[in-house]
Amino acid sequence: MIQDLKTKEPNTLISVSSPWPDLYEGNPNIHSSIKIGDMHVDYEKYFNNIICHEPYMSTYLKKNIHIVDAWRQQYGLENGSDGSGYGDTCIDLAIQEPDKVYVVEIFQHMRGNPFIIIQLKGGTNPMSPTNPQHHDQMIIERNYEQDYNLISALHEEFKDIWLLIVRTKNDRYSANVDMLPRVARLEDEKLSALFAMTQECLSFVTIDSCIHHFAAQRGNIKRGVVMWGRATQPDMIGHDWNANLLSDHPSKVEIRPERVVEELKEILKKEKPVLNEDNKGQADNIRRNTGVKRRLIQ
């Protein structure tokens, strides 16, 4: 959305207030980024018109509009840059220099082998080691309980590929996962480092959390498998070039590991699409080049 907003108002400086301001460093269309809620910031210095839109408390609750389109409507960007009437869901972030060095170190640990990123937990509170399941966190926690069954099945199926698990120290994985030889872990790393690693992965298997968004980088889109509970849906916050698996359970992420493995096998069979670098019709280009249709797999 940032590129289209800058095109609409080229002389306006764009500042972003976000929980993760470092993610926006290096974007030429963003003048500055600050941590949201930081009351020590001189907001007059950073912002002239402050436009705030919280889609989680608006029409977005009806689950019939994508979050990107909800934001575009708020900023007067109803029409997509390709004239389609909607915006694409690609992201435009830059890899920071320290994170490039970090990526090389992780590659060395995995002996230069191709890898798949795994993220099966999310929403736990990294600041609460004594009570990560505090009631304020339970509403946003996402947890795939069959972690060992799935990871061991992936490990057995893809013998030439490493599995890189992204987690916080409070994400509770089965202890048996640590016994698998081709498994590496990134724990409590800053999001900019996770973004940098995602740009180098072969694919990913994840719940609805940060990784499938980082994999949507314009010009370097990675297709993977995303598992969804019933709180959020792919039509609301997903990317339709992925294999989006809907839960068999009405209120949690519960999907058979065999289904995930089969979907990932299909993704890895396909040749990586050639993606355009411009801002026009990116999602359509992906569908044309890969034959991918919107996949809501019940």
Image (tube, helix red, strand yellow):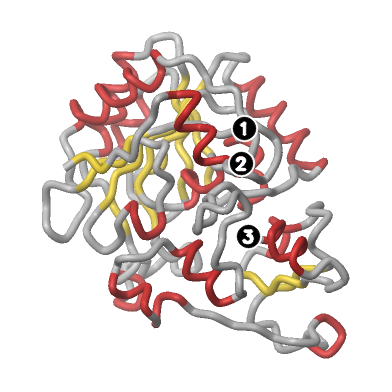
Q: Nearer the viewer, mark 3 or mark 2?
A: 3
- In the rendered image of this protein, does residue 81 appear above or below residue 74? above
In the rendered image, the residue lying farthest to the top is 160
Q: Is residue 251 left or right of residue 97?
A: left
Front one among 217 and 285: 285
Badge number at residue 70: none
Q: Do the numbered discs 1 and 2 sit on residues whose CB atoms are within 8 Å? A: yes
Q: Is residue 28 left or right of residue 165?
A: right
Kindly identify which residue carries mark 2: 217
Near-viewer residue (85 or 260): 85
Question: Which amino acid lies under the numbered mark 2 shown in the image of this protein?
Answer: Gln
From the top left corner, tell me how far across and down residue 233 is, in percent.
30, 56
Give the residue at mark 3. Answer: 1
Position of residue 83 in the picture relative to residue 183 (left or right): right
State the residue position of label 1: 220
Measured Cα–Cα span from mark 3 to mark 2: 13 Å
Q: Dot 3: within a 10 Å radius of its alpha carbon, few (fewer than 14), some, or many (20 or more) residues?
A: many
Callout 1 amino acid: Asn
**Residue 212: x and y, percent?**
47, 44
* Distance (Cα) linking label 1 and label 3: 17 Å
Q: Give the CA distance from mark 1 to mark 2.
A: 5 Å
Q: Is 262 or 166 nearer to us in this picture?
A: 262
Quarter of the image where the C terminus is located: top left
Mark 1: few/some/many CA within 10 Å (<14, 14-19, 20+): some
Instruction: Specify the amino acid type for callout 3.
Output: Met
